[in-house]
Image: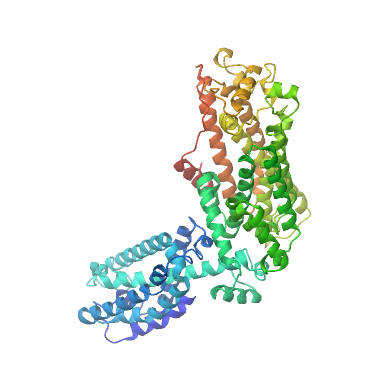
């Protein structure tokens, strides 16, 4: 709308001039006769360029580009805020002189008209644009090329009242390219300004978040307008830059540590994606805090620290987190004094998300950490130590599933609660949230979604365990395979029962002893000859059962969140297939084969292909 109001007077002035001829700005000629067509062209251009910008912006998060250069040297500051003004000023005079000599000066008039708006937009969004330069350049180049080609095609085909004697291929000259370059740049600057302001509102503002009509993504309420103005003027929030720095930290960590979740997050709405990243970062950081320590006392202290943090946050209102109160200072002191530096970013951002989520999934996650502490770190009595090398192992499938519910099923429920917080009225009649009404099945459907989310988390964790049998034993000293799996009389997975008994190794307590020896610190036991297929087949069969009974529940989620959720599940299913092929594939062909058990990976292109298939429902 801003661009439409600002551009229309300029183009109206240009088309009304008497000096138009075949060599002048062809877009002006194209729109000369019907003002409706002129306005329609501007609207279409805005819509297309904004969609290009949104498409490229999907590859990043707006919040990571806010306040990025505030600690930079003065030279960079001058580059961002002053050199572009000089460049634009020189561009104006260069264009004016060129057009005045070679043509008429419509292009110079057009650029001079846009110069004040560009200067203002750059002053407000210059740092954001420089930080997000890849998105900006890609959008400018693609949109300018698109409209230049469109304009050339129209003129070449003698359309829109251009006769056969029209200018033809001369539309490739600097005037038409500059017109689209400048007009598209203005649209991108405006879109970036909106992204920046909206991000500040969505992440930080306490007085506007609940008043925003989330489905349409527009500022629909009167009291949200002041918040938008505050964001434009950078008046909110007090701790904005700390949060922005923290987002950059967790964004980079997720990109490096979990490609599956990172790729799937592209397909979530921006506000949901931010909460998704925060939640994943918090769970990942707390898990690393436990895994990094093998000392019983230190692990116990860290579990206690995380519990104290949850107590502090869940006894704090959102206003107290952000308004500089005594409780806010207490939170800041806790972060500085008790939370390890590498985890402070995730803990800080968790404050914003926790206020909209129940606590119980986090307590279940802590129970999983306590489980690891008791079973894989704490030494037991001497007799038990002699038998299991100091580890209280998982006895059966029920205990394994319970552990998976603690450490992974709880995270599945957390993610669903994030969806609930953004789309509070999910029900069976429509899965697109806030416009729907709560029917008699509302609570029943919520409970069903949460139960299935927990089961999905269990399935994904079982795939992780199957993939990392060797790594868990050698690096973490942990064995997640239940003792009953090593019993030669235990149930053999269906896929193995179809194979010639001579082609695979049967379960044996000796395999448990081998893993136990390898799990000891400074152990030199080689696990290359461990029969991984015997146990991964069992774990993958369990994972498939839980996944198959839960996958349909994704259809009950908000439509804008379904694709991302399916992508995560399908990528993990692909990992399961790769693990199966690594360990069981050759055996199923009648070959006696022992894999080395090293971690398998799904390539980036495979992840992209899975994402495209789930996004566009390709078979």
Q: Nearer the viewer, residue 329 or 139?
A: 329
Relative image position of residue 377 (x, y in whole percent): 68, 34
Q: Residue furthest top?
A: 502
Instruction: Kindly tell me whether residue 559 is visible in this rendering.
Output: no
Instruction: Kindly tell me whether residue 238 is visible in this rendering.
Output: yes
Relative image position of residue 507 (x, y in whole percent): 64, 18
| Picture layout, residue 14 above or below residue 435 | below
Relative image position of residue 169 (x, y in whole percent): 24, 67
Relative image position of residue 547 (x, y in whole percent): 64, 37
Q: Nearer the viewer, residue 511 or 335?
A: 335
| Picture layout, residue 242 above or below residue 32 | above
Instruction: Name the side, left or right, on which 275 lies relative to 164.
Output: right
Q: Nearer the viewer, residue 163 or 328?
A: 328
| Picture layout, residue 294 above or below residue 316 | above
- Give the mark count: 0
Q: Residue furthest right?
A: 440
Residue lying at 59% horizontally and 13% vertically, measured from the top left: 501
Instruction: Name the side, left or right, on which 550 lies relative to 610.
Output: right
Residue lying at 62% horizontally and 72% vertically, measured from the top left: 220
Image color mode: rainbow
């Amino acid at each position: 709308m801003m661009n439409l109001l600002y551009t229309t007077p300029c183009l109206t002035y240009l088309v009304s001039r008497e000096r138009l001829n075949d060599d002048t700005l062809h877009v002006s000629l194209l729109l000369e006769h019907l003002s409706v067509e002129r306005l329609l062209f501007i609207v279409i251009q805005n819509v297309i360029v904004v969609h290009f910008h949104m498409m490229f912006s999907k590859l990043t998060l707006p919040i990571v580009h806010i306040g990025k250069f505030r600690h930079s040297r003065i030279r960079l500051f001058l580059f961002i805020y002053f050199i572009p003004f000089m460049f634009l000023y020189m561009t104006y005079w260069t264009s004016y002189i060129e057009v005045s000599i070679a043509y008429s000066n419509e292009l110079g008039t057009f650029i001079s008209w846009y110069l004040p708006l560009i200067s203002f937009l750059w002053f407000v969004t210059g740092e954001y644009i420089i930080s997000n330069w890849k998105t900006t350049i890609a959008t400018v180049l693609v949109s300018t090329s698109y409209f230049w080609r469109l304009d050339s095609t129209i003129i070449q085909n003698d359309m829109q009242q251009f006769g056969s004697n029209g200018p033809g291929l001369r539309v490739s000259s600097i005037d038409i390219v500059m017109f689209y370059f400048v007009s598209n740049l203005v649209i991108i600057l405006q879109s970036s300004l909106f992204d920046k302001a909206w991000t500040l509102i969505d992440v930080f503002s306490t007085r506007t978040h609940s008043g925003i009509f989330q489905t349409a993504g527009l500022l629909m309420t009167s009291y949200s307008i002041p918040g938008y103005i505050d964001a434009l003027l950078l008046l909110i929030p007090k701790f904005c830059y700390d949060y922005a720095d923290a987002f950059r930290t967790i964004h980079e960590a997720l990109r490096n540590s979990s490609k599956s979740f990172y790729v799937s997050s592209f397909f979530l709405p921006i506000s949901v994606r931010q909460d998704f990243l925060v939640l994943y970062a918090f769970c990942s950081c707390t898990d690393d805090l436990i895994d990094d320590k093998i000392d019983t006392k230190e692990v116990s202290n860290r579990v206690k620290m995380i519990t104290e943090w949850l107590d502090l946050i869940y006894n704090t209102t959102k206003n107290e987190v952000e308004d500089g109160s005594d409780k806010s200072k207490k939170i800041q002191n806790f972060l500085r004094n008790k939370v390890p530096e590498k985890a402070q970013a995730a803990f800080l951002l968790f404050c914003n998300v926790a206020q909209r989520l129940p606590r119980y999934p986090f307590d279940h996650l802590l129970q999983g950490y306590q489980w690891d502490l008791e079973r894989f770190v704490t030494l037991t009595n001497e007799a038990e130590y002699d038998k299991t090398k100091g580890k209280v192992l998982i006895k059966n499938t029920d205990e394994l599933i319970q552990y998976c519910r603690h450490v992974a099923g709880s995270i599945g429920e957390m993610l669903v609660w994030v969806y609930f917080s953004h789309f509070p009225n999910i029900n069976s009649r429509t899965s697109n949230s806030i416009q729907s009404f709560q029917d008699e099945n509302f609570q029943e459907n919520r409970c069903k979604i949460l139960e299935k989310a927990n089961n999905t988390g269990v399935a994904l964790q079982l795939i992780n365990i199957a993939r990392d049998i060797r790594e868990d034993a050698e690096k973490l000293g942990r064995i997640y395979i239940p003792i009953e799996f090593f019993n030669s009389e235990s149930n053999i997975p269906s896929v193995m029962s179809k194979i010639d008994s001579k082609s695979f190794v049967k379960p044996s307590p000796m395999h448990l002893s081998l893993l136990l020896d390898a799990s000891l610190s400074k152990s030199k036991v080689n696990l290359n000859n461990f029969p991984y297929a015997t146990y991964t087949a069992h774990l993958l069969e369990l994972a498939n059962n839980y996944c198959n009974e839960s996958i349909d529940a994704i259809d009950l989620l908000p439509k804008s969140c379904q694709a991302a959720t399916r992508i995560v599940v399908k990528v993990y299913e692909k990992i399961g297939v790769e693990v199966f092929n690594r360990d069981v594939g050759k055996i199923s062909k009648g070959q006696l084969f022992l894999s080395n058990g090293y971690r398998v990976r799904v390539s980036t292109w495979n992840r992209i292909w899975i994402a495209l298939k789930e996004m566009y429902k390709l078979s």
